[in-house]
Image (tube, helix red, strand yellow):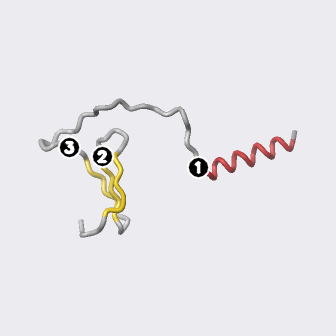
């Protein structure tokens, strides 16, 4: 790995991996372990959201479909 600046870091939802992205678009995935090489234990339970996230384009398509459907009634 060269001397390139890391521009973004994110942990996975289960805190087991760190994902880094550098200026040169290199993506690295790091396994998170303690000093003895053991996997980290989770202190928190995984919770689920009741919302469903969609892209703006999917939402726009859905709105267009509903408008065309309403006009045809």
For mark 1, give the secondary structure: loop
For mark 3, give the secondary structure: loop
- Residue 13 place in picture, x, y as percent: 37, 40
Q: Give the residue drawn at x 55%, y 36%.
A: 51
Residue reaching furthest to the left: 36
**The disc label shown at residue 55, or none:** 1
**The disc label shown at residue 17, or none:** 2
For mark 2, give the secondary structure: strand
**The disc label shown at residue 33, or none:** 3
Real-space CA distance between mark 1 and mark 2, rounded to the nearest whole angstrom: 26 Å
Residue reaching furthest to the right: 73
The image shows residue 59, relative to residue 8, as above or below, that is above
Instruction: Say which quadrant the C terminus sits in.
Output: top right
Which quarter of the picture shows residue 70?
Answer: top right
Query: How crowded is the residue under tag 1: few (<14 C-alpha within 10 Å), some, or many (20+)?
Result: few
Q: Give the residue drawn at x 35%, y 62%.
A: 7
Q: Earlier in the sequence, mark 3 or mark 2?
A: 2
| Residue nearer the viewer, 9 or 28 | 9
The image shows residue 49, relative to residue 28, as above or below, that is above
Left or right of 7, for residue 65? right
The image shows residue 41, relative to residue 35, as above or below, that is above
- Residue 34 place in picture, x, y as percent: 17, 42
Left or right of 60, for residue 68? right
Real-space CA distance between mark 3 and mark 2, rounded to the nearest whole angstrom: 9 Å
Q: Are marks 3 and 2 in contact (CB under 8 Å)?
A: no
């Amino acid at each position: 790995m060269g001397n390139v600046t890391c521009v973004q870091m994110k942990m996975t939802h289960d805190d087991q991996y760190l994902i880094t992205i550098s200026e040169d678009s290199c993506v690295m995935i790091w396994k998170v372990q303690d000093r003895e090489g053991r996997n980290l234990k989770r202190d928190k339970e995984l919770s689920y959201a009741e919302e469903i996230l969609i892209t703006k384009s999917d939402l726009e398509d859905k709105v267009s479909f509903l408008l065309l459907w309403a006009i045809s009634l």
